[in-house]
Image: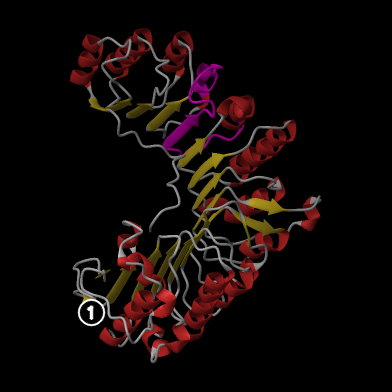
């Protein structure tokens, strides 16, 4: 039998319990209340990923989705948390405006997460826009917004949802297909924001200048963003002052003008504590710009506790100069990474050893180093390293490397934990590994990677 959802009205179709999945974080009820009295609703259409010949696959596009929303709003007068996840290519957003009481139901929402995959038509995009407009009109007290989509939505409609919020603190926007154009939506961003995460978003000069006005912003993550910037003199970049920024995660962003980054660093000043940099090194200009960023971090941010830099080989000379001239006396964690799967060229890690601060406790060597340089490093390093991490993804570390580490453990007696990517098919001697295991706490295959960024998936 063939089903056509265009021939089925909303009144004719009522979903069965097996077809309707409405769950909360603590139970599978349609609408549940936790200990704090907070109402939480989660709607997912994962069951539509089943056999396309299943009747529900055809019916859900119009009737089931609409019925789900009607049932949700009938069960709950007001919602606190709304998580909406639409997976299949046929998923649709219902006509919210046709549901009685939708404004009242949405008026108390404080957390809104929206995940969408596979909607490409203009009609469905229009319904998403309508949904965002209704939500923005109805609720002004959302404190956390997370949006992951693979359908480009005009930035005006995202702004209509965001800029009316009076207590927005956490904002995440990810675009899973290419890069979406959101060049100016940050210009009206609420000043209450403390966390901002953007993935594959195009930003303009004005967007970056707007960040300087977010005085309460504590953490920023920008990944694969593209900056539409013009040639600038430093005088053209707004000076940021009094920022509360504590953490910066900067990965694979392209065409970023380094002067904006420098201004952000200067504004954060002594409040900046954690910095993770995955900067491009494809051009000579990239290396020059990164050196300016490193200089700014060393000069204006003396209180950094965690620092991680990828493709350290390209910037190593400047990094050594930075540690020599501006020692971070509060640095406790340092990661030296490689963009080339931890293979050659080798890093002369021994050059850095004399300048590492006495505060350093955690060291992650995620790049290639020779046996001799590693030995010289441990001989010169005065920092009492307690945790050492070596991913060894390409199995470039040898028994000689491990013997050097074993001797360091015996001589310095400061190392308490050793994370190493060990497997029995490596050239590493198991007897040597067993000897180290008896001396310190060892971990394998659970190494913390500060450069890791999860794929665009559910919240």
Neighbourhood count class around disc 1 (C-alpha, 10 Å): few under 14, some 14–19, many 20 upward: few
Query: Magenta span: helix, strand or loop, mainly?
Result: loop
Q: Which residue is mark 1?
A: 37
In what quadrant of the picture does the N terminus appear?
bottom left
Magenta stretch encompasses residue 331: yes
Q: Residue at x 40, y 37 (%)?
A: 449
Q: Is residue 77 left or right of residue 369?
A: left
Q: Could you say where residue 104 lies in the image, as x and y percent from the top left? A: 39, 90
Q: Nearer the viewer, residue 438 or 205?
A: 205
Above or below, comparing residue 270 to residue 207 in the picture: above
Q: Determine whether the residue tagged by mark 1 lies in a helix, strand or loop.
A: loop
Does the rendering let one see residue 214?
A: yes
Q: Which residues are magenta?
A: 325-354
Q: Could you say where residue 405 lies in the image, as x and y percent from the top left? A: 34, 15
Above or below, comparing residue 297 to residue 182 in the picture: above
Q: Nearer the viewer, residue 457 or 145?
A: 457
Q: Nearer the viewer, residue 425 or 22?
A: 22
Q: Is residue 281 left or right of residue 31?
A: right
Q: Could you say where residue 411 lies in the image, as x and y percent from the top left? A: 30, 14
* Quadrant position of residue 182: bottom right
Q: Residue at x 20, y 15 (%)?
A: 434
């Amino acid at each position: 039998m063939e089903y056509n959802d265009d021939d089925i009205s909303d009144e004719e179709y009522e979903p069965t319990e097996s077809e309707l999945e409405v769950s909360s974080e603590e139970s599978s009820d349609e609408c549940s209340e936790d200990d704090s009295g907070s109402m939480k609703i989660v709607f997912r259409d994962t069951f539509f990923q089943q056999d396309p010949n299943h009747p529900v696959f055809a019916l859900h596009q119009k009737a089931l989705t609409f019925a789900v929303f009607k049932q949700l709003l009938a069960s709950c007068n007001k919602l606190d948390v709304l998580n909406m996840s639409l997976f299949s290519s046929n998923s649709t957003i219902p006509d919210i405006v046709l549901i009685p009481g939708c404004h009242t139901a949405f008026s108390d929402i404080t957390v809104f997460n929206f995940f969408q995959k596979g909607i490409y038509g203009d009609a469905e995009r229009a319904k998403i826009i309508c949904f965002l407009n209704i939500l923005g009109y109805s609720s002004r007290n959302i404190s956390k917004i997370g949006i992951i989509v693979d359908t480009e939505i005009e930035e005006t409609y995202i702004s209509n949802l965001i800029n009316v919020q009076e207590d927005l603190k956490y904002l995440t926007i990810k675009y899973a297909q290419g890069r979406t154009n959101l060049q100016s939506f940050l210009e009206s961003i609420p000043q209450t924001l403390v966390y901002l995460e953007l993935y594959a978003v195009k930003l303009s000069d004005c967007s970056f200048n707007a960040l300087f006005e977010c005085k309460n912003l504590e953490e920023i993550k920008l990944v694969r963003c593209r900056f539409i910037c013009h040639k600038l003199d430093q005088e053209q970049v707004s000076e940021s002052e009094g920022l509360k920024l504590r953490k910066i995660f900067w990965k694979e962003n392209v065409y970023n003008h380094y002067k904006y980054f420098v201004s952000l660093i200067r504004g954060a000043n002594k409040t900046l504590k954690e910095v993770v940099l995955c900067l491009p090194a494809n051009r000579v200009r990239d290396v020059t710009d990164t050196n300016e960023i490193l200089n700014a971090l060393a000069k204006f941010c003396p209180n950094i506790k965690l620092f991680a830099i990828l493709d350290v080989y390209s910037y190593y000379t400047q990094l050594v100069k930075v540690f020599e001239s501006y020692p971070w006396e509060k640095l406790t964690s340092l990661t030296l990474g490689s963009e080339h799967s931890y293979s050659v060229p080798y890093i002369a890690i021994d050059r850095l050893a004399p300048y590492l601060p006495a505060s350093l406790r955690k060291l992650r060597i995620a790049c290639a180093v020779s046996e001799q340089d590693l030995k010289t490093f441990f001989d010169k390093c005065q920092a009492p390293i307690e945790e050492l991490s070596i991913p060894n993804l390409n199995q470039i570390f040898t028994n000689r490397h491990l013997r050097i580490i074993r001797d360091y453990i015996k001589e310095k007696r400061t190392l308490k934990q050793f994370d190493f990517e060990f497997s029995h098919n490596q050239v590493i001697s198991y007897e040597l590994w067993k000897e180290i295991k008896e001396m310190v706490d060892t971990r394998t295959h659970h190494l913390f990677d500060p450069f890791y960024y999860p794929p665009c998936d559910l919240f």
